[in-house]
Amino acid sequence: MPDTHAQSKAAARRQKSAEPDDLISVLGPDNRKDAPTDLSPDELTKIYAMMVENRLVDERMITLQRQGRIGFYIGSVGEEAAILGAALALRPQDWFFPCYRENGVALMRGLSLRNYFDNMVGNGEDPVKGRQMPNHIAWRPANYASVSSPIGTQYTQAMGAAWAAKLKGDDVVAMSFIGEGGTSSNEFHVAMNFAAVMKAPVVFMCRNNQWAISTPLSRQTASETFAVKAMAYGMPGIRVDGNDLLAVHRVAKEACLRARNGEGPTFIEAVTYRVLGHSTSDDPKVYRPDEEVEPWRKKDPIERMRIYLDARGLWDAKQEKKLREDLDVRIRETFAAAEAAQGPTIESMFEEVYARPFWNLDEQRAEAESFGTAPKH
Ligand SMILES: Cc1ncc(C[n+]2csc(CCOP(=O)(O)OP(=O)(O)O)c2C)c(N)n1
């Protein structure tokens, strides 16, 4: 008897793993050099360099986790265009509510590589003083809210911030990211409904990377696409090639303009693919075939941008080599400095929690301090 369940699962996956021609695309499958964009040559080469930095940081962190030098890592390999292309549409006063793969945006908005690595090892200079998991960045100076790993919560937080900005009359847009798995959370529905009703200035980004840990697209929704869900809430649902930086930037910019013009939220499904495991704690080989991954490696968003820039005469092999060599040195040296730094002090456990300390905390602090100095992290 044929395995109809397996067949229908495969059919559903084929249906939803969009081919480029049913998505908004600017670069197109050939990464054509006349692809229209309002990004200047300088902006294009800068965002390309940022994508490469994001990739090299991810690759180095995964190696360091395998060496036992950091505890955990979750990166964005293959999803850089969907993430950085969207955030590039934001202005400095706008707010960003990340899921957990968007830390390249914190770097793009001014977080130093050193502070990023401080968080990775949880040392005393970590902006969150080692109180969070690695990868859980918060960067207040750039309106980069704390990474929030409970699925879907990013949308409600962004919706709240956007609505508050609207009530206060502040010219602020909030952008938020979830994966397609996040669309199955309560928070997704609450945020989408509330934002549309209140016309909150928010851009809901969804990285449809086709896997939620081991749950495939076909088990995530019975809807034809994720973008179509936006219709029910009364907001535009846009479906874009998530490996095409120019296309993602264009639709995100249009969504930001809608938000700023008081027209309310937009939902953007950026179709991409999670080429690696969910995190360093996951082995995708146990639940998906390698053959599924291979075609997506050929659509690598960084390689597509490099081909485009090269064709436009904005980038060449020499610049590529220098960029990668410089980044490699900077990443290694910066990480070594973060790794050598002192761990958080024992006293820091008692700071920044209450405005005024309680007597019992004072007692606990005195007792903790009597044990000696802070250990190395
Ligand atoms: C409320 C909640 N439930 C479960 C988890 C465990 N969890 C962490 S990541 C993840 C999958 C998320 O997949 P998706 O939203 O598609 O994002 P992706 O990791 O693919 O970027 C799950 C279930 C969680 N963090 N929060």
Image (cartoon, rainbow, N blue to C red):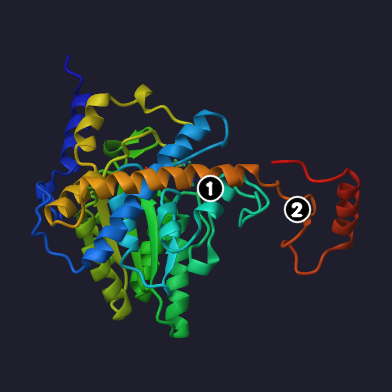
Q: Which residue type carries mark 2?
A: Met
**Camera sees residue 181:** no
Q: Which residue is found at the position 45% from the left and 44% from the top?
A: 329
Q: Quadrant of ligand 1?
A: top left
Residue density around tag 1, few if under 14, some if 14–19, many if 20 or more, within 10 Å: some
Residue pointed to by mark 1: 334
User: Quick one: SS at disc 2?
Assistant: helix
Mark positioned earlier in the residue sequence (2 or 1): 1
Q: Is the distance from the Cβ of mark 2 to the nearest ligand 1 atom less than 8 Å?
A: no
Q: Which of the 4 image quadrants contains residue 254?
A: bottom left
Number of numbered markers: 2
**Camera sees residue 89:** yes
Q: Which residue is found at the position 21% from the left and 64% from the top?
A: 41
Residue pointed to by mark 2: 349
- In this rendering, position of residue 26 left or right of residue 214: left
- In this rendering, position of residue 163 left or right of residue 78: right
On screen, 256 above or below 363? Answer: below
Q: Position of residue 298 (x, y in %)?
A: 19, 37
Q: Which residue is found at the position 57% from the left and 34% from the top?
A: 69
Q: Position of residue 206 (x, y in %)?
A: 32, 53
- In this rendering, position of residue 88 left or right of residue 13: right
Q: Disc 2 vs disc 1: which is toward the camera?
A: 1
Quadrant where the image shows the C terminus = top right
- In this rendering, position of residue 231 left or right of residue 31: right
In the picture as drawn, the residue positioned furthest to the top comes out as: 1
Q: Position of residue 152 (x, y in %)?
A: 43, 53
On screen, 371 above or below 293? Answer: below
Q: Which residue type carries mark 1?
A: Thr
Q: Nearer the viewer, residue 367 or 246?
A: 246
